[in-house]
Image: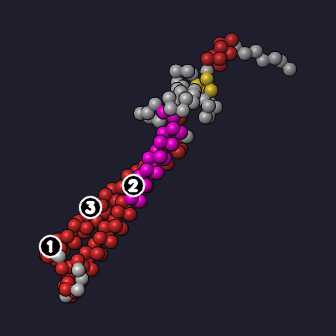
Amino acid sequence: MEKLELNQDFVEGKKVLSRCLVCDVYVHPEESFACPRCRKGPLCRRHRVPGRKECASCVFDVGKRELMALNGQEMSIKQFLRFLQFIFLVFAVLFVALKVGLGEYVEILQEPVLAKYLLYLGIIPVLAYILFAVLLYNQRGKIADAELQLKKLDNRR
């Protein structure tokens, strides 16, 4: 068989190319980058997130942590809504007890300020519940957006 000779320009050009650590594609040094966060490099442009200096894996990890924080905030809001429901029920029971005529027998209902403003005090948890329900709805929208961004980044990793 005949021996194949390689052109000298091809051999020198191969020395200049660097290999992407993720997908094993050879790229020119000008087209590659090193991630400043994880110090992984050289990587090809396919693994760089547009508008960011980090690689897709680092941005994915940061997004995952942000999503976990948003989920934790959502749980806190849900727990606070349960607390507001409890407060509302307490005021509802006191209001019914006052209207039924148990004010004479229940010591806390004998307080004149509480008996006079009980209805107004009962409205405060309702308004707070509405406010925090809107916040919870907004939080769920943020979580959905973050999950969508993570799905897009997962394809780039």
Asked if residue 122 is positioned above or below residue 138 in the image, the reply reads below
Near-viewer residue (71 or 48): 71
The quadrant of the image that shows the C terminus is top right
Q: Position of residue 139 (x, y in %)?
A: 36, 55
Instruction: Give the crowd class for mark 2: few <14, some 14-19, many >=20 residues within 10 Å.
Output: some
Cα separation between marks 1 and 3? 26 Å
Q: Main secondary structure of the magenta part?
A: helix
Q: What's under tag 1, amino acid-wise?
A: Val
Q: Which residue is mark 3?
A: 131
Q: Is residue 106 above or below residue 52?
A: below
**Disc 2 versus disc 1: distance between alpha carbons?**
36 Å
Label 2 sits on a secondary structure element that is helix
Q: Earlier in the sequence, mark 2 or mark 3?
A: 2
Q: Which mark is residue 43?
A: none
Q: Which mark is residue 113?
A: 1
- Work out whether residue 135 or residue 5 is closer to the camera in this orientation and state it: 135
Q: Residue furthest front?
A: 107
Badge 2 is on which residue? 73
